[in-house]
Image (spheres, rainbow, N blue to C red):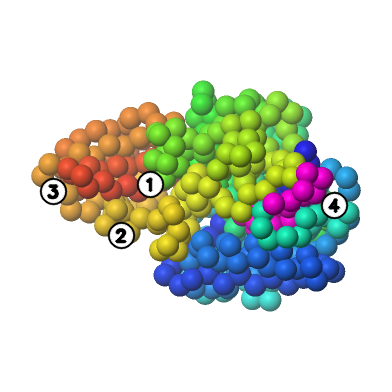
Amino acid sequence: MRPRTLFAALLLAGHADAATVTVTHIGTPAAAQVAIDHAAGIWGGILTSPVDIKVRVTWFPLGASTLGVTFPNGRRDFAGAPLPLTWYATALANSIAGMELNPGESDMDVYLNSGADWYLGLDGLPPAGQHDLVSVALHEMGHGLGFVGLSKKVGGDGSLGLLQMADFAPLTTSFPWPQLDTLPGVFDVFLSDEQDGPLTMMANPGTQLGAAMTGGQLRFNGPLVLAANGGQGARVYAPSTFALGSSCVHFNEATYPPGNPNELMTPFSAPGDANHWPGPLGLAVMQDIGWMLAPDVGLHAPDEAARLAAWPNPVDDVLHLGAAPAEAVLTVRDLDGREVLRTRATNAVDASGWCAGAYVLERRAGAVVQRTVVIKRQAGR
């Protein structure tokens, strides 16, 4: 099997408009363009966004071991950003802002291996010796849309937000490489080690973070992933030897093997293997990081009635909530599922004693369930 990706991207939070994904091809053969454009159309049918998503695809010899590499463009602290000091793919940032924040730049640069033996059909039935181009292009664009973080490990130290363009030489981006400033991506916010907790709560850089990145115990603990996975986070690929661009940015290969509905966003693709859909957990990840799904997609985006209003977010002390019926029960859990608070109907809670990090709030009143994610700010920020 070959790795599908070296490095990937950050994500979109959509609005009510259907997504339009436009692809610019650099050296791509005409028959391959059809397959890649088909993959772009699949994502366009899944997501909603008022701003076109711009994909730049380069047909390039990546060597014998890599099928694709994706670099996202990114922005942080833009107007309307849900989380401060957090990186978002420009596609996501554009969608949240409702305007193009990176005019003249692509939202992602995708390199596809010109030397691979590709199956160019659209039917998802590649022969045993060929790699399905639609599947690999769909996977790479998924990274470009935000299924990725900013993890790196040097020696024993792991880090978030210390990636450099030089780490991926000789490949380059068509847009300026951002100053990542030791900050996480929105995907990273939901990553948690089963023993030591959220990655974003660890010293960065640091050995604890490095151990978590190679300990095989990472999960993506977004609230919609938890809901779609029986209350458990989705296991993330974190092998004992860190692989830049594969570790911490994919679902775990052994947990979601070929044939599993969630295999698309795993790190390896075997000849003869094909998957043309992100799967329920892949779709849930997209929603957790901010995407809205098209109304006819199998896992629907929650409507406004299912969203628990909570402000300010991030919070320092008092967190205000939307009106609650008398019988409502509010539960607050950290990303490891540990219960922090359980209380009956209330419109405000004291968050001053919570540790810094992300929390899942769930309010139940009979059959009505509302959820949201709130960030407790670190002291001094």
Element on which disc 4 rests: loop
Could you say whether the residue bearing mark 3 is in a helix, strand or loop?
loop
Image marks 3 and 4: residues in contact by CB distance under 8 Å: no
| Residue 325, numbered circle | 3
- Check whether the beta carbons of the residues at disc 1 and disc 2 lie within 8 A of each other: no
Q: CA distance from mark 3 to mark 2?
A: 17 Å
User: Which quadrant of the view contains residue 212?
Assistant: top right
Q: Which residues are magenta?
A: 125-143
Mark pair 1, 4: CA separation: 44 Å
Q: Is 64 rendered above or below residue 102?
A: above
Q: Is residue 110 magenta?
A: no
Asked whether, in this view, residue 6 is left or right of residue 320, the answer is right
Q: Percent position (x, y) of residue 216?
A: 62, 27
Please state if 212 lies on the left or on the right of 64 as rendered. Answer: left
Residue 341, given in percent of the width and then of the height, sits at 28, 33
Which image quadrant for residue 24?
Answer: bottom right
Label 1 and label 3: CA atoms lie apart by 21 Å
Q: Position of residue 110 (x, y in %)?
A: 74, 60
Out of 100 and 147, give the one closest to the viewer: 147
Q: Residue at x 32, y 31 (%)?
A: 340
Closer to the camera: disc 4 or disc 2?
A: 4
Which numbered mark, 1 or 4, is in the foreground of this view?
A: 4
Numbered disc 1: secondary structure: strand
Mark 1 highlights which residue?
Answer: 374
Q: Percent position (x, y) of residue 220?
A: 52, 38
Which residue position is annotated with label 2?
304
Which comes before the other along the chain, label 3 or label 2?
2
Q: Which residue is mark 4?
A: 116
